[in-house]
């Protein structure tokens, strides 16, 4: 009744293999699709855990880090607070200097060739350097400088005390003597024998140094000096010196008792031999000025009075670390150039009058004091030239290298008297002093990059506390 009809379809081997591959691909596709659906379901169900776990880990890490910082902050704050109670500075935290102990040379490009700014001798030749002391030329305009003292009876009111003078409206005191304008003018009239005010006017004038320290200072022929009064800057150890310089050069830091106490709080204590590292620390008592900047001018400008036997001196501001061989520096900046004094050009300005505007703008001196000084300089005829003798008129005096001669001693004395009479911003008065002392020609005003090669600059650590009357 029914007929079974069938159709046979024959497949070749190639078609059979292709069909098998299609089935495999279909299974793989279904498997991937299933995996994706599973991942989506897991994500929807557990997405909060994926957010919370990393967030919790990050929170724990940050909490631990902040805790460590707070511990360090509290420790530093306690140190700064203790220091501020002694030196009167604000208990603000400071970062560790990043360029401390750097010895890499500073370079500049000259005629397309990169050269080192400070051309020191090779190390083996530095070890062979000796202190060179040439005889003064018979053509030197100054043969002798005499220093005024209270025995000259030039100070009116010499019976008053040092503390009384600090409260009066005068910057002259028993240490400086009372220089009149007539005496000021005569101090610039260069002749064979000069008689000038140059600090240390009275035995009651202050700046007292122990006999032990005086004895040490008497033995110095070459000295590198710095100072920190009023608990100001830290003491940075000199680096880069040769073994020869270590034997022949004195390193002397002048502190007052406030700085001694401030440094003891940060574990810097003067040893029984009077040293901290390579520095001989001389503790000065009875400082003559309430203004610590003026007190700092005494070791800065009057090294010939503090070190009467010294032939050469290098001054370094307390904000800097001296990082070169002292005898090598004398050779490079004085001996080879046949100079008596070396000082850095100012990096930003060239004119005294432009510098005065910047000083007032930055609140580094009272406007009325600066105006008095500029009016006097205009009256005396100081030109507004930006260059003297082909060199920048304005200098930056954080590093001063000089030979101790009657002429350089005279220059430093009259410079000191100017900062006492007017403002303590010594860069304002230095060009004036050079201009008035026309006989002074042997000066090496080196570029800023040379100064940067001489020192690592740290900046001032804290504000010095003024003396109380």
Image (cartoon, rainbow, N blue to C red):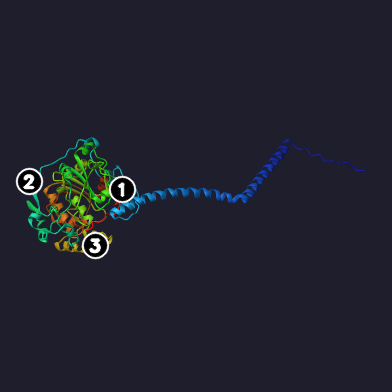
Q: Are marks 1 and 2 in contact (CB under 8 Å)?
A: no
Q: Are marks 2 and 3 in contact (CB under 8 Å)?
A: no
Q: Quadrant of the N terminus?
A: top right
Q: Label 3 crowding class (10 Å Cα cut-off): few <14, some 14-19, many 20+?
A: few
Q: Quadrant of the C terminus?
A: bottom left
Residue 137 % position (x, y)? 9, 45
Q: Secondary structure at mark 1?
A: helix
**Residue 337 visible, this orientation:** no
Identify the disc placed on residue 265: 1
Residue 419 % position (x, y)? 18, 57
Q: Earlier in the sequence, mark 1 or mark 3?
A: 1
Image quadrant in which you'd find residue 312: top left
Instruction: Between label 1 and label 2, give the one nearer the viewer.
Output: 1
Residue 259 % position (x, y)? 26, 50
Task: Name the residue tied to disc 2.
Answer: 138
Task: Name the residue tied to disc 3.
Answer: 366
- Residue at x 8% of width, y 49% of height: 144
Q: Nearer the viewer, residue 73 or 197?
A: 73
């Amino acid at each position: 009744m029914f007929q079974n009809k069938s159709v046979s379809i024959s497949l070749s081997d190639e078609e059979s293999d292709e069909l098998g591959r299609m089935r495999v691909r279909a299974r793989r596709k279904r498997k991937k699709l299933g995996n994706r659906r599973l991942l989506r379901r897991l994500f929807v169900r557990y997405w909060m855990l994926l957010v919370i776990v990393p967030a919790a880990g990050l929170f724990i890490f940050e909490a631990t880090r902040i805790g460590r910082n707070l511990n360090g902050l509290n420790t530093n704050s306690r140190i700064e607070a203790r220091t501020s109670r002694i030196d009167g500075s604000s208990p603000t935290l400071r970062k560790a200097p990043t360029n401390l102990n750097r010895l890499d040379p500073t370079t500049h490009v000259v005629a397309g060739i990169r050269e080192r700014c400070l051309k020191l001798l090779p190390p083996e030749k530095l070890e062979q350097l000796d202190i060179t002391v040439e005889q003064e030329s018979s053509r030197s305009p100054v043969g002798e400088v005499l220093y005024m003292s209270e025995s000259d009876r030039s100070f009116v009111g010499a019976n008053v005390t040092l503390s009384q003078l600090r409260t009066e409206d005068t910057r002259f005191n028993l240490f400086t003597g009372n220089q009149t304008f007539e005496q000021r003018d005569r101090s610039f009239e260069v002749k064979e024998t000069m008689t000038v005010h140059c600090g240390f006017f009275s035995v009651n004038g202050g700046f007292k140094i122990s006999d032990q320290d005086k004895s040490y200072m008497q033995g110095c022929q070459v000295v590198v000096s710095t100072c920190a009064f009023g608990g100001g800057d830290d003491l940075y150890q000199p680096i880069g010196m040769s073994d020869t310089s270590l034997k022949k050069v004195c390193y002397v830091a002048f502190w007052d008792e406030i700085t001694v106490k401030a440094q003891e709080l940060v574990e810097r204590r003067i040893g029984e031999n009077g040293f901290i590292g390579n520095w001989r620390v001389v503790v000065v008592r009875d400082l003559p000025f309430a203004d610590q900047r003026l007190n700092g001018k005494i070791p800065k400008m009057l090294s010939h009075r503090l070190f009467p036997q010294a032939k050469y001196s290098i001054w370094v501001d307390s904000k800097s670390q001296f990082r070169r061989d002292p005898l090598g520096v004398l050779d490079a900046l004085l001996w080879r150039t046949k100079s008596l004094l070396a000082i850095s050009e100012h990096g930003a300005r060239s004119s005294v009058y432009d510098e005065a505007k910047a000083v007032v703008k930055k609140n580094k001196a009272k406007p009325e004091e600066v105006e008095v000084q500029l009016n006097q300089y205009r009256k005396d005829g100081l030109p507004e030239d930006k260059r003297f003798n082909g060199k920048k008129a304005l200098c930056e005096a954080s590093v001063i290298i000089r030979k101790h001669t009657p002429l350089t001693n005279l220059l430093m004395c009259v410079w000191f008297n100017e900062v006492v009479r007017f403002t303590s911003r010594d860069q304002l008065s230095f060009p004036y002093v050079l201009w008035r002392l026309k006989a002074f020609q042997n000066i090496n005003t080196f570029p800023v990059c040379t100064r940067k090669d001489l020192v690592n600059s740290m900046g001032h650590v804290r504000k010095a506390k003024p003396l109380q009357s």
